[in-house]
Amino acid sequence: MGTELLNHQLDRELREEHDISFSEYEILVRLSEAEDGRMRMAILADAMSHSRSRVTHTIARMERADLVVREASRADGRGVEAVMTEEGRRVLIAAAPTHVRGVREHLVDLASKQDFAALGRIFDEVSDRLLRAKPDEADIR
Amino acid sequence: MGTELLNHQLDRELREEHDISFSEYEILVRLSEAEDGRMRMAILADAMSHSRSRVTHTIARMERADLVVREASRADGRGVEAVMTEEGRRVLIAAAPTHVRGVREHLVDLASKQDFAALGRIFDEVSDRLLRAKPDEADIR
DNA sequence: CTGCGGTAGTACAGGCTTCAACTACCCGGA
DNA sequence: TCCGGGTAGTTGAAGCCTGTACTACCGCAG
């Protein structure tokens, strides 16, 4: 699988040029697309197929770097919302071209339109299956 | 990228059913294909695009589990060879069907022959480029 | 209103990977 | 022969992820 090589490379480029990891970048992207740049921790976790524990840690690091702040949810006393800061938006805007260029350079430009489309079809399907299997863990039991 | 989901799933299946990680499985596969079931650490590292440090740690874990033993290289005083044990071969033979089934179930069976071929073409190309760039790190400098 | 199962998030310990020393050894040139 | 640069591998610390346990809160049934 060259996929690890690719992810690793994209991660490294973001770290070197903008001091954020690929996961942090993805969180910023999702927050930027959300209403008011804010999202509940659990939604974030599900959206990225990360464990809640992982999101807690990642958001903690991002909070230290002033990319987000944590706010208690008004609606649900258990809830916490991650909110993108100005600095977070600034870093996202700076980092996006790096990421886009990386994906082009290391992936898109190397494949024909047809092959790239096939790639999309395959991983949509793979994700669908694996995500559908997880929620209730009803596999074989 | 659903690729992380897939790797994670394959890793989990190997851990649950055979108590080895995906990386350990891959090392066993490579050793089994090598002359006498033995390989130099550096060759192993290059073959899997892992850091030497990583291979050192992984082999150390595998040695604790009796899957391999370490032997000093006769030819090169600096060298160390990882040698597959009987137990290692036994575990590989047991684990291989799990892995093959996993790949079929979570990937191959979900794609058409054509799309799957496209996948192969793309990641061969991606790997080639990234590996060609690395060795001398001559990128832009 | 009280109890209770379920959900949200965090804390902590353990495991894997990385990075940067560091040791040991190889080999070619002076 | 001896030196110096390069290679092989290991070590230990630090970072990130996982699983588990735990607290706090929700909401419904009784």
Image: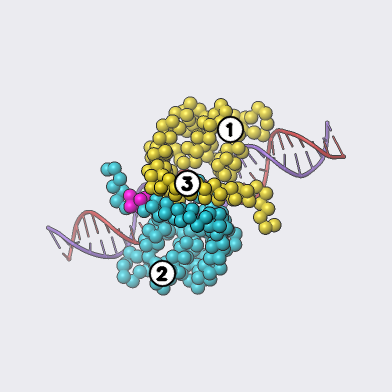
Chain colours: A yellow, B cyan, C purple, D red
Question: Would residue B135 appear left or right of D17 to someone viewing this image?
Answer: left
- Do tag 1 and tag 3 residues touch (Cβ < 8 Å)? no
Magenta span covers which residues?
Answer: B129-134
SS at mark 1?
strand
Q: CA distance from mark 2 to mark 1?
A: 51 Å
Judged by its main secondary structure, the magenta piece is helix
Residue A39: mark = 1
Residue B86 percent across, percent down from the top left? 50, 73
Q: Earlier in the sequence, mark 1 or mark 3?
A: 1
Residue position marked by numbered label 2 in the rendering: B34
Residue in the image at 52% along x and 39% along y: A58
User: Same chain for marks 2 and 3?
Assistant: no
Residue in the image at 52% along x and 37% along y: A27
Q: Quadrant of residue A71?
A: top right
SS at mark 3?
helix
- Write down the chain letter for disc 3: A
- Do tag 2 and tag 1 residues touch (Cβ < 8 Å)? no
Q: CA distance from mark 1 to mark 3?
A: 31 Å
- Magenta stretch contains residue A137: no
Residue B58 percent across, percent down from the top left? 46, 59
Residue in the image at 42% along x and 66% along y: B82
Residue position marked by numbered label 3 in the rendering: A117
Packing grade of label 3 (10 A; few <14, some 14-19, many >=20) is: some
Question: Would residue C6 appear left or right of C13 to someone viewing this image?
Answer: right
Q: The C terminus of chain A is located in which quarter?
A: bottom right
Q: CA distance from mark 2 to mark 3?
A: 37 Å
Residue A30 seen by the camera: yes
The three-letter code of the residue at mark 2 reads Ala
Closer to the observer: label 1 or label 3? 3
- Write down the chain letter for disc 2: B
Residue D18 percent across, percent down from the top left? 57, 50
